[in-house]
Amino acid sequence: MLFFVAATANTDLVSGVSLGAPVFTFLMALGNIFGQGGSSLLACLLGQNRIEDGHHVSVWCFYLSLMVSFVIGILLILFQKPMLSLLGANKETFDYAKEYYIWLAIGAPVIVNSFVHTNLLRTEGLAKESMISTIGGAIVNILLDPLLISTMDLGAAGAAIATVIGYIFTMCYSLYVVQTKSDCLSASVHKFHISSQDQK
């Protein structure tokens, strides 16, 4: 992404996009809390042949990550000005940083959630499918970057939109694999609950 941003030769644009990097890193870390944390618990359950409990864990990781990241996204939008100031945006870079930042906030649920099933699929043994979803998302991002940043002249917003669309691909493909190939994972909303048996 930064390659295509730098190709515009607009130093303020490059700086503005770079200022959004901590937000992007934060969303990735949040996704890995659910993805890698859920994977550790899932591995233990699968080792005990508790497949149905594994379904519940994957469902909770999936939906809870969506809800938490949705709230985080709203908070990022509501507090955008103080957050951008904290990140170091000035009058030259503020507008560029804001464009990138807003689209990251809007896409927060997608970015965070995309890390859930890519991790859980590897735990089940579907490493190839997890790799395809991750690399596929990266390829979509790379293909869209020059189109949105330069051709459509969307600048910082284009860079963020391309990133979000890439993660949409990753999330959707991973969900497709869960629905069609996975025996140990689930995304059924009917399993998004805690029963008395789960608490024992």
Image (cartoon, rainbow, N blue to C red):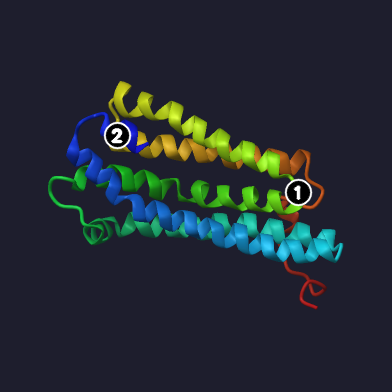
Q: Amino acid at mark 1?
A: Gly
Residue appearing at x 52%, y 52% in the figure: 112
Question: x, y percentage for residue 146?
Answer: 36, 26
Q: Which residue is mark 2?
A: 5
Q: Is residue 41 visible?
A: yes
Outermost top residue? 151
Between 68 and 166, the one lying in front of the other is: 166
Q: Quadrant of residue 177?
A: top right
Question: x, y percentage for residue 136?
Answer: 57, 33
Label 1: how many residues lie within 10 Å, few (<14), some (14-19) or many (20+)? few
What is the quadrant of the N terminus in the image? top left
Residue appearing at x 32%, y 43% in the figure: 100
Question: x, y percentage for residue 171?
Answer: 59, 42
Q: Quadrant of residue 61?
A: bottom right
Q: Is residue 185 visible?
A: no
Label number found at residue 45? none
Outermost right residue? 49
Residue appearing at x 73%, y 69% in the figure: 194
In the structure shown, which secondary structural element does the residue marked by tag 1 occupy? loop
In the structure shown, which secondary structural element does the residue marked by tag 2 occupy? helix
Question: x, y percentage for residue 68?
Answer: 52, 60
Q: CA distance from mark 2 to mark 1?
A: 37 Å
Between 57 and 76, the one lying in front of the other is: 57
Q: Which residue is mark 1?
A: 125
Of label 2 and label 1, which has the lower sequence position? 2
